Image: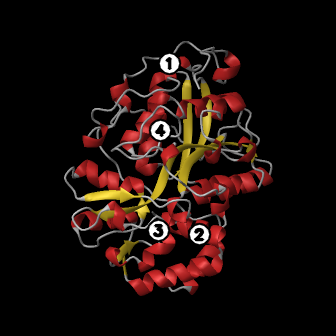
């Protein structure tokens, strides 16, 4: 893969600044729709073919677990994570061109820079933009026969699905992805989730209990105890939720639900972090948001009266993922696969769980704050790649007067 001028070498971080919580990004629209502003033991063998291009001269010092773990109330007192350690993986060596979409406010780039510190012979040339925009760029470049990057790290499954649906990927090997449940992998190993985010209903514990929140979103408009809820309909994560509802329940049901919610009374906010803050402040009794926004509030305000309820088996229980994909035409399949294995290491999963409050994708790493594990959630049977079909959702939401 030839180095392209658009890829610039990032200055290495000399220390891992995982102690601060950075701004979290939400989901993005599918390509063509514009962008919204808005994670099994290894055998330990190492070889040049697994570690990528270039000769290995040995890894640098691997930081202790505390360097990968965030700070604050939600990160303290956690058990050590299980899973394959970075120490047990082949060394990363060579140059990697990376399209990095969204990046959770810089968290993804921060982890990449930590890997560069560990492996002196590993260099990443990142190009960052919105995930949807990069997905379209990848498809265009592959169709033109001139892919410019080796791997795509997207903030959402819809962008991964768009690339996969346009056959612009190379399958990842089983050994790189088999630690992740099949629900969070693309068909044919087109992509793999590295960090998850669950739809949830944050509620104010001074006003409501978990029993006040219905087990399905369909019941919420008629749940008198909830009162006027908060939502952020222009936010990418909410659009993905409505997309899932449209595909699972049908357009008519999704349109009716949006209308019923407006009739029941909703307060509109700019993003789901604000929704979660307003719930904690008592401005609204409950709302709709990805789970990690309430976790962010709790980490900053441990006594905030906010907790999470989860619906079951419907679009309100959707678990979306950030994930990685090998771009078709890369000449560095082994390096890409090893890079993905590092994203799914115990250290990486602990990093994503305690810094961005994402759901870990591998068994043995607990979510923060007493959240139910992914296995304990009850998401719908749904192909996350279908979230890329966003344009009908936007039309539906405009027709319902939400956008």
> Alpha-carbon distance for marks 3 and 4?
30 Å
Q: Disc 1 on helix, strand or loop?
A: helix
- In this rendering, is residue 59 above or below 353? above
Residue highlighted by disc 4:
10
Q: Residue furthest left?
A: 303
Query: Mark 2 sits on what residue?
Result: 245
Q: CA distance from mark 1 to mark 4?
A: 24 Å
| Mark 3 → mark 1, Cα distance in angstroms | 39 Å
- In the rendering, which numbered label is found on residue 132? none
Residue at 23% of width from left, 59% of height from top?
305
Please state which of residues 143 and 279 is positioned toward the viewer in this rendering: 279
| Tag 3 residue | 235
**Residue at the front extreme of this rendering:** 211
Verify CB contact (< 8 Å) between mark 1 and mark 2.
no
User: Which is more N-terminal, label 1 or label 3?
Assistant: 1
Dot 2: few (<14), some (14–19), or many (≥20) neighbours within 10 Å?
many
Q: Secondary structure at mark 3?
A: loop
Q: Which mark is residue 87?
A: 1
Label 1 vs label 2: CA separation? Answer: 42 Å
């Amino acid at each position: 893969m030839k180095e392209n001028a658009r890829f610039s070498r990032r200055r290495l971080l000399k220390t891992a600044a995982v102690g601060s919580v950075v701004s979290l990004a939400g989901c993005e629209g599918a390509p063509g729709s514009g962008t919204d502003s808005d994670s099994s033991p290894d055998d330990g063998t190492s070889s040049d073919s697994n570690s990528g291009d270039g000769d290995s001269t040995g890894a640098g010092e691997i930081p202790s677990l505390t360097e990968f773990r965030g700070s604050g109330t939600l990160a303290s007192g956690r058990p050590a994570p299980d899973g394959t350690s970075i120490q047990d993986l082949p060394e990363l060596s060579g140059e990697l061109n990376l399209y990095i979409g969204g990046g959770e406010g810089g968290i993804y780039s921060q982890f990449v820079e930590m890997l560069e510190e560990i492996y002196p012979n590993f260099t990443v040339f990142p190009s960052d933009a919105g995930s949807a925009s990069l997905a379209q760029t990848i498809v265009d470049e592959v169709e033109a026969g001139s892919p410019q990057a080796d791997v795509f790290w997207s903030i959402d499954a819809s962008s991964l699905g768009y690339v996969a649906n346009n056959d612009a990927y190379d399958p990842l090997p089983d050994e790189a992805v088999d630690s992740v449940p099949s629900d969070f992998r693309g068909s044919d190993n087109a992509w793999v989730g590295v960090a998850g985010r669950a739809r949830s209903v944050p509620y104010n514990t001074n006003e409501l209990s978990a029993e006040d929140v219905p087990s399905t979103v369909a019941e919420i408009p008629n749940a008198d105890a909830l009162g006027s809820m908060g939502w952020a309909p222009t936010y990418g994560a909410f659009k993905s939720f409505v997309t899932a509802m449209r595909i699972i329940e049908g357009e008519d049901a999704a349109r009716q639900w949006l209308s019923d919610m407006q009739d029941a009374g909703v307060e509109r906010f700019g993003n789901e972090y604000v929704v979660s803050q307003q719930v904690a402040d008592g401005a609204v009794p409950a709302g709709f948001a990805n789970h990690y926004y309430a976790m962010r509030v709790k980490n900053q305000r441990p006594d905030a009266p906010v907790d999470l309820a989860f619906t079951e088996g419907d679009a309100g229980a959707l678990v979306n993922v950030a994930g990685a994909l090998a771009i078709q035409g890369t000449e560095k399949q082994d390096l890409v696969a090893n890079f993905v294995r590092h994203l799914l290491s115990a250290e990486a999963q602990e990093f994503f769980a305690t810094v961005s409050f994402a759901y870990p994708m591998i068994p043995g790493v607990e979510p923060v704050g007493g959240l139910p594990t992914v296995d304990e959630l009850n998401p719908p049977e749904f192909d996350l790649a279908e979230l890329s079909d966003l344009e009908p959702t936007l039309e539906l939401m405009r027709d319902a007067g939400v956008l």
